[in-house]
Structure formats: structure tokens, C-alpha cells
Amino acid sequence: MKTVEENNVEIVSAFIEAFWNQSELDCVDRFLSDDYQEFSYQSKEGLKKFAVTILEAFPDKHYTVEEIIGQGDKVLVRMTVKGTHEGMFFGTAPTGNRMDVTLYRQYRVADGKITEHRGWIDMVTMWHQIRGN
């Protein structure tokens, strides 16, 4: 029998794969609770809008979970995102440069749904890689 932590890690892992890697933006209804709180992108719609921005700017993007830890109702994730800058990204025209950036995510899971998300990314490294400086 799986622990709560193991179940929560599986839910978050499945969400990352479906939403970020497979670009199944409508999976939010399957993975996120009705009262979901988004602290990085303001709302479910903000999360989806940001995902579209990433997909348009980095069509070959791929997220890799490097480490994932479940503790109680929290799941902490360290992952990387890699991709080629092939579309507009916050006013920056495509450069063709590759990015390879570390991200940190904290999720809260209750009753089989993600109820909360906070995220951090190394934006300084990302901009240096995209701009090539």
C-alpha cells in the first residue's frame, strides 16, 4: 500500500508530464482542485497563459524532474527545463539559443488534487542563455 507522500508525488509527477511536457493544458481540470491557489502565475488561467508563452517561445522545451520529495501534503520538485528560443519571449525576438535552467516547485496536494503551487526559476541564467551573453 502506498503512503500519502508516494501518492502525492505520483500526482505531481503526472501533472508535470501532462501539462508541461505534453502541453495538455486542459489537464488542469483533472489535476487541480476547484479552490486551487496559484502563487506564481496568479490563477489557473494565468498558469495556462504562461504555458502557452513558453510553448510558443520554446517549442522543443522539455522538463526533467531531477529530484522530487513528498512530505505530508507538500511535494517539492527540483527540475530543469531545456529548449531552443524559437519564438517571441517577453519582447525578446527568437535568438536560436538553447536554455538549460533549474526550476524549483512546491505543490500542496489534498484528496488527490493539487491545491497550491509556488515556483522559482533562475531567471538570470535563463536570460543570459537566451541572449547569448
Image: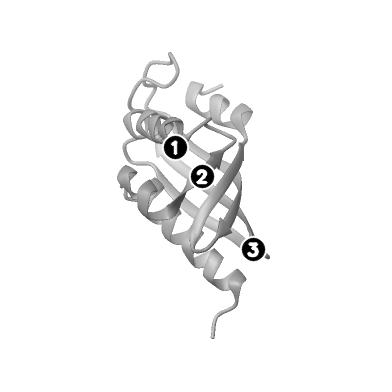
Whether the residues at callouts 1 and 2 have beta carbons within 8 Å, the answer is: no
* Quadrant location of the N terminus in the rendered image: bottom right
Cα distance in 3D space between marks 1 and 2: 10 Å
> Which residue is identified by label 2?
35
Q: Are marks 1 and 3 in contact (CB under 8 Å)?
A: no
Give the residue number, with chain letter if any, for mark 3: 69
Q: Residue at x 48, y 36 (%)?
A: 99
Q: Quadrant of the C terminus?
A: top right
User: Relative to residue 89, is residue 6 drawn left or right?
Assistant: right
Q: Is residue 56 visible?
A: yes
Label 1 secondary element: helix
**Callout 3 crowding tier (Cα within 10 Å): few <14, some 14–19, many ≥20:** some
Question: Residue at the right extreme?
Answer: 71
Residue sticking out furthest to the top: 91
Residue at which label 1 appears = 44
Q: Residue at x 57, y 46 (%)?
A: 116
Q: Secondary structure at mark 2?
A: strand
Q: Is residue 82 above or below residue 75?
A: above
